[in-house]
């Protein structure tokens, strides 16, 4: 790869690796797994520190990022077309079959003929206003094989997909093995529910939580906070919120859907033995702090549900909680999650 110094050879002509070579290889593999190209890895490793990245390297990384985003957009467009076919429910199947048959016969010889494709999509959409959409039927055709997951987890993943309209989200959702069981036990006991901001609290199923005798509390209890940037700044500017976090009862459920710093503070408090939540639903938004906070959450040893990377938000965090709440009330004696964990 050209990223290691000239090799030292044994008498039998085998390459000899020094401890420094092994460490360098580990760095290379780690960066490659993160998606960096080899040319960028070389420049990163040659830099004296993380802040020593040259402007030219930053420009190259920005160019690569925009290229990846364009590829994702094209793939998203393709996925949408496939969803338009596969995601049709049974009431649309006849129209779907007719449209597919016409697609096979279609010959697009010029830009003008592209209008015929639009006509086909209009024909395919002809049945959608005659019945309510059967979401579960669509998901059966679109979701990957989840047969190894418990029924409760599959329902949770399905609800998250329906909340954002992106089936690929399933590949980024992470649950610890004991997350579902711990959440169900806590909810049965009437645990405290703490959300990071009012927008998340407002999305919880209060009727079902009242039936379970669970109290809801908002950490940053400021009704004027409506966005992630405001939540992040508010948590840093007023230590009252941190003090409130440290006094949350044990076996509570924490739901963080906005501020990365709140999730980081939760991880700190867990590591220092200040709090012992039954479950942390950590889905803050952000491009640097949020992914780092989620990685830390997965390493602190407490039950968690999160979404890798920058994806998240208050709606998804609340949807995850509501799915667990609903499944407990609808299937109180279900133990399927114990087998999968």
Image (cartoon, rainbow, N blue to C red):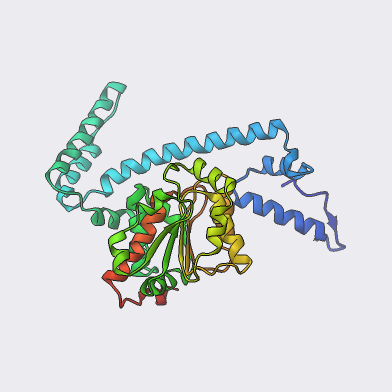
40 shown above or below 265: above
Kindly indicate the quadrant of the structure image that contains residue 123: top left
For the point 76% across and 57% down, the residue is 23
Q: In the image, residue 196 lies at what x, y percent?
A: 47, 53
148 shown above or below 99: below
For the point 48% across and 37% down, the residue is 71
- Quick one: quadrant of the C terminus? bottom left
- Residue extending furthest toward the front: 240
Does residue 107 appear left or right of residue 90 in this picture?
Answer: right
Q: Would residue 167 be visible to someone looking at this image? A: yes
**In terms of depth relative to the viewer, which is nearer, 63 or 309?**
309
Does residue 129 appear left or right of residue 55 in this picture?
Answer: left
**In terms of depth relative to the viewer, which is nearer, 18 or 238?**
238
Q: In the image, residue 72 lies at what x, y percent?
A: 46, 40
**In terms of depth relative to the viewer, which is nearer, 111 or 326?**
326
Does residue 326 appear left or right of residue 270 in this picture?
Answer: left
In this rendering, the count of numbered labels is 0
Q: In the image, residue 81 lies at what x, y percent?
A: 32, 41
Kindly indicate the quadrant of the structure image that contains residue 233: top right
Q: Would residue 326 be visible to someone looking at this image? A: no
121 shown above or below 23: above
159 shown above or below 274: above
- Residue extending furthest toward the right: 11
Q: In the image, residue 154 lies at what x, y percent?
A: 35, 64
**In terms of depth relative to the viewer, which is nearer, 128 or 1?**
128
């Amino acid at each position: 790869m050209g990223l290691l110094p000239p090799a030292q050879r044994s008498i039998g002509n085998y390459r000899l690796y020094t401890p420094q070579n092994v460490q360098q290889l580990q760095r290379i593999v780690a960066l490659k797994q993160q998606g960096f190209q080899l040319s960028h890895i070389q420049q990163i490793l040659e830099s004296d520190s993380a802040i020593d990245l040259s402007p030219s390297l930053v420009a190259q990384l920005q160019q690569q990022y925009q290229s990846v985003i364009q590829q994702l957009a094209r793939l998203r467009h393709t996925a949408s077309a496939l969803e338009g076919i596969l995601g049709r429910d049974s009431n649309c199947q006849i129209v779907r079959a007719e449209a597919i048959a016409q697609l096979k016969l279609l010959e697009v010889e010029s830009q003008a003929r592209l209008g015929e494709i639009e006509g086909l999509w209009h024909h395919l959409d002809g049945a959608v206003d005659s019945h309510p959409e059967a979401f579960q039927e669509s998901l059966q055709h679109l979701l990957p094989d989840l047969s190894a997951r418990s029924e409760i987890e599959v329902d949770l993943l399905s609800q998250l997909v329906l909340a954002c309209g992106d089936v690929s989200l399933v590949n980024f959702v992470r649950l610890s093995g004991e997350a579902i069981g711990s959440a169900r036990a806590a909810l049965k006991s009437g645990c405290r529910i703490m959300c990071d901001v009012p927008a998340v609290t407002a999305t919880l199923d209060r009727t079902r939580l009242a039936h379970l005798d669970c109290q809801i509390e908002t950490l940053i209890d400021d009704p004027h906070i409506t966005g992630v940037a405001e939540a992040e700044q508010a948590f840093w500017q007023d230590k009252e919120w941190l003090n409130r976090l440290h006094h949350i009862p044990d076996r509570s459920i924490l739901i963080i859907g906005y501020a990365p710093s709140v999730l980081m503070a939760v991880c700190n408090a867990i590591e220092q033995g200040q709090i012992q939540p039954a479950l942390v639903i950590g889905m803050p938004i952000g491009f640097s702090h949020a992914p780092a906070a989620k990685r830390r959450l997965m390493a602190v040893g407490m039950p968690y549900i999160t979404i890798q990377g920058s994806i998240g938000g208050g709606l998804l965090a609340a949807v995850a909680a509501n799915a667990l709440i609903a499944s407990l009330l609808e299937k109180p004696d279900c133990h399927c999650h114990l087998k999968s964990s």
